[in-house]
Image (tube, rainbow, N blue to C red):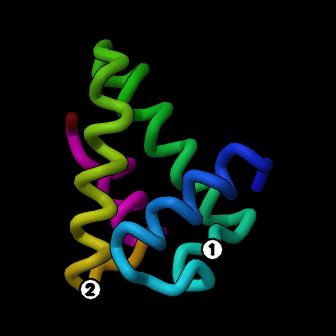
Amino acid sequence: MDAWLSGARDAIAHAADVPRDQLELTDEDIRTILDLARIGAHDSGERTNAPLLCYLAGIAIARGGVLHELADAVRRAPL
């Protein structure tokens, strides 16, 4: 993670009262999230769908979803 993203992560952790180590991203997480953003932006034809799709995935993860399973579901969906 670069310095800017690390700083943003720390700010989010502080604001949410969550230990920052719970907001670590693996290299696989990063690739999957960026692929979701690519799908949201390019496959939909609307760039604004990229952050919205990633946010929806984040909500699902907070409620027990698994990132790679959610990404696979989006990849398979007839969108």
Q: Amino acid at mark 1?
A: Glu
Q: Is residue 77 magenta?
A: yes
Q: Which residue is mark 1?
A: 24
19 to 9, vertically: above or below? below
In percent of width and height, residue 52 lies at 26, 39
In percent of width and height, residue 9 lies at 56, 61
Label 2 neighbour load within 10 Å: few <14, some 14-19, many 20+: few
Q: Amino acid at mark 2?
A: Gly
In percent of width and height, residue 36 lies at 45, 44
The residue depicted at 30 percent of the width and 22 percent of the height is 48
Q: Which residue is mark 2?
A: 64
Query: In the picture, which quadrant includes the N terminus?
Result: bottom right
67 to 72, vertically: above or below? below
Horizontal placement of 56 versus 39: left or right?
left
Determine which quarter of the picture holds residue 50: top left
Horizontal placement of 11 versus 21: left or right?
left
The residue depicted at 60 percent of the width and 64 percent of the height is 29
Residue at the limit of the structure toward the top, as seen here:
45
Query: In the picture, which quadrant includes the C terminus?
Result: top left
Of 26 and 10, the residue lying toward us: 10
76 to 45, vertically: above or below? below
For the magenta stretch, what is the residue range? 68-78
The residue depicted at 57 percent of the width and 78 percent of the height is 20
Label 2 and label 1: CA atoms lie apart by 17 Å
